[in-house]
Image (cartoon, rainbow, N blue to C red):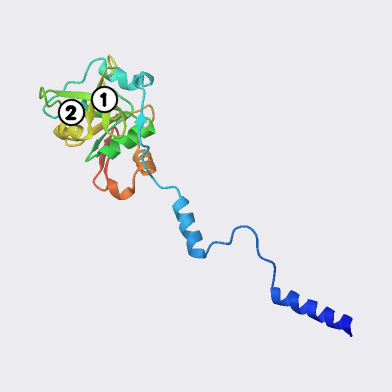
Amino acid sequence: MKKLFLILALAFWVLSCGPPPQTGKFPLPEAATTSRMQSGQSQASLPASGLVDLRQMPYVRNVFKTPPRISSGGLDDVFATLRSKVDNIAIISNGSLDVLKAFIAKGWAPIVLIQIPQTQSRELLPVVRYDARQFYLQNPTNLSERRLSYDDFQRAWAVSRSKCLLITAQNLSEAKIQEVLGSYLPKESLGTLSVRSKRHAYRK
């Protein structure tokens, strides 16, 4: 009888203690899991800095062996002159600093027409580098650099109404340019962008 009492007492003690405690991490609530998954998804964004090497771009440097004449028509006239001489060329209008950065991040060197404040002279130069504070423009002939803060660049670039030229080693189609920009920038930021290439003209 005493033995039966001990067995019943032991069984009651085991049941009252419940299951053994779990070890390791507790599962996340569904909302927390979803939030973590969303934050881990890749989003289109620009690198903090970018650089291209003009020495590796003979198709750009060749254009400047005989510098294009800058007339009153500005970059549009330069494009009209060069498109009969260059295979892959496009002119982009209504651009932005981020559009230029995206092209550099891709490995292209956007060519801009700027007006130097000190002399009021206009220069046609590729943008080859950017960082947190400024753009770096380079003379393709002697590879000398000019640095402009973003505010100064914005003012200097206004002379050509935020246009740029692209000259690349590959075909510049609408799909390709959209693909490149979409890799770095949200689509809604490209609403007013317009492009004319050697063979096609379109407006987004």
Name the quadrant containing residue 121: top left
Residue 114: assigned label: 2
> Mark 1 or mark 2: which comes first in sequence?
2
Q: Position of residue 78 (x, y in %)?
A: 20, 26
The residue lying toward the viewer, choosing from 151 and 163, is 151
Task: Classify 194 as above or below 50.
Answer: below
Task: Classify 95 as above or below 16.
Answer: above
Q: Quadrant of the N terminus?
A: bottom right
Point out the frontmost of discs 1 and 2. Answer: 1
Q: Position of residue 96 (x, y in %)?
A: 24, 39
- The answer to whether marks 1 and 2 mark residues whose Cβ atoms lie closer than 8 Å is yes
Residue 186 visible from this viewpoint: yes
The residue that appears at 18% across and 32% down in the rendered structure is 152
In space, the residues marked 1 and 2 are separated at their CA atoms by 10 Å
Q: Position of residue 36 (x, y in %)?
A: 48, 55
Q: Residues within 10 Å of mark 2 (few under 14, many from 20)?
A: many
Task: Classify 180 as above or below 137.
Answer: below
Q: Amino acid at mark 2?
A: Ile
Name the quadrant containing residue 120: top left
Position of 44 compared to 76: left or right? right
Q: Amino acid at mark 1?
A: Leu
The residue that appears at 14% across and 32% down in the rendered structure is 159
The residue that disc 1 covers is 137
The residue lying toward the viewer, choosing from 28 and 17, is 17
Q: Secondary structure at mark 2?
A: strand
Q: Position of residue 123 (x, y in %)?
A: 18, 23
